Image (tube, rainbow, N blue to C red):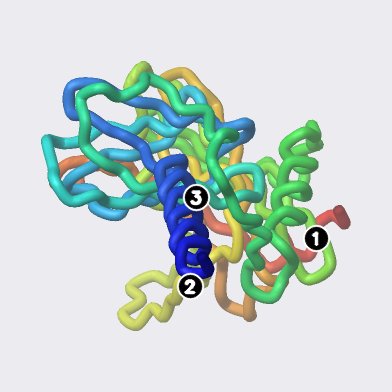
Amino acid sequence: MKAFLVILFCAQVGLSVKAQTASDTLKVSDTKTSHLVCPDKVDYVQAGDYSLVQAEVVPELSNMVRIKATGPFEKPTSLTVVCADHIYSFELRYGNDVPITYPVEIFQSKDALTFSGKLMPDYLLKDHCDRILDKHHCRKCYHKRKTEKDGIKIRLNSIHLKDDALFFELEMKNKTQLTYDVESIHFWITDKRVVKATNVQEYQVLPDFQRNKVSRIPGETCVREVFVFEKMTIPDGRILRIELNEKALGNTGRKLSFELKNRDILQARKL
């Protein structure tokens, strides 16, 4: 009798585990495109093997993840999505009978209260960035901190300070009909321009947090982004160069950059 109960218990546990696994499994196809619909903006997407599956946030709808197989495959791969401070982990399997949409709320998740650098939890950084983006700032302080080239314009709108965090708000405008695909946005501390300088020292400063992770600027569109750094000042004789690079074949993309001085950072407004 005891042996029977043990076998029955194990069978129930096995069925429960199988059901849980099945609930976190997505079928994908190379003939249909499926979409994972999230309740808020998707902060992170990572497929286990991009040679098997294409997974990306839909540029026009930041709460949707587009998923499609590159071809039939046998062994499953994985997909991780972070949205609304929750992490969703999926097993992707190939199949032709795939749904067009998957509402993410029907799947299990874990809290994703991540912590960036030495600053503050990401959900607070996100909230502060949104407060900045919701405001209409007076741009007189930084009206010269901009550059424009080939129909693309980038400018500094504001700098805010909260505790030990600096928030740099950038505005990028595409005046052309052609989409601008962002390859990277870099921040460099470098020497001031010197005529015939032969030994220029520079190093890259990496942000602790980026709100929107802008990857595309559609034609005739203006987008805003906030980068968060640990508080800093720029040494004498140096500047902070902000550089926008376009993704294009043969390194032919449009590149723009402009410079900030230490006094620009010292004008940061308290958030």
CB of mark 3 within 8 Å of CB of mark 1?
Answer: no
Q: Nearer the viewer, residue 135 or 29?
A: 29
The answer to whether residue 144 is seen in the rendering is no
Q: As drawn, is 242 to the left or to the right of 96?
A: right
- Is 158 situated above or below 230? above
Q: Nearer the viewer, residue 187 or 235?
A: 187
Q: Furthest-front residue in view?
A: 1
Real-space Cα distance between discs 2 and 3?
Answer: 59 Å
Residue beneath disc 2: 190
Can you tell which of label 2 and label 3 is closer to the viewer? 3
Residue beneath disc 3: 16
Q: Earlier in the sequence, mark 2 or mark 3?
A: 3
Q: Earlier in the sequence, mark 2 or mark 1?
A: 1
Residue at 58% from the left image edge and 77% from the top image edge:
237
| Local crowd size for mark 3, using a 10 Å CA cut-off: few (<14), some (14–19), many (≥20) | few
Q: Nearer the viewer, residue 155 or 50?
A: 50
- In x, y percent, where is residue 168? 66, 53
- In x, y percent, where is residue 119? 72, 70
The amino acid beneath tag 2 is Thr
Residue at 61% from the left image edge and 47% from the top image edge:
211
| Labels in figure, total | 3
The amino acid beneath tag 1 is Leu
Can you tell which of label 2 and label 1 is closer to the viewer? 1
- Is 218 situated above or below 77? above
CB of mark 2 within 8 Å of CB of mark 3?
Answer: no
**Label 3 SS:** helix
- In x, y percent, where is residue 217? 44, 30
Residue beneath disc 1: 161
Residue at 49% from the left image edge and 50% from the top image edge:
16
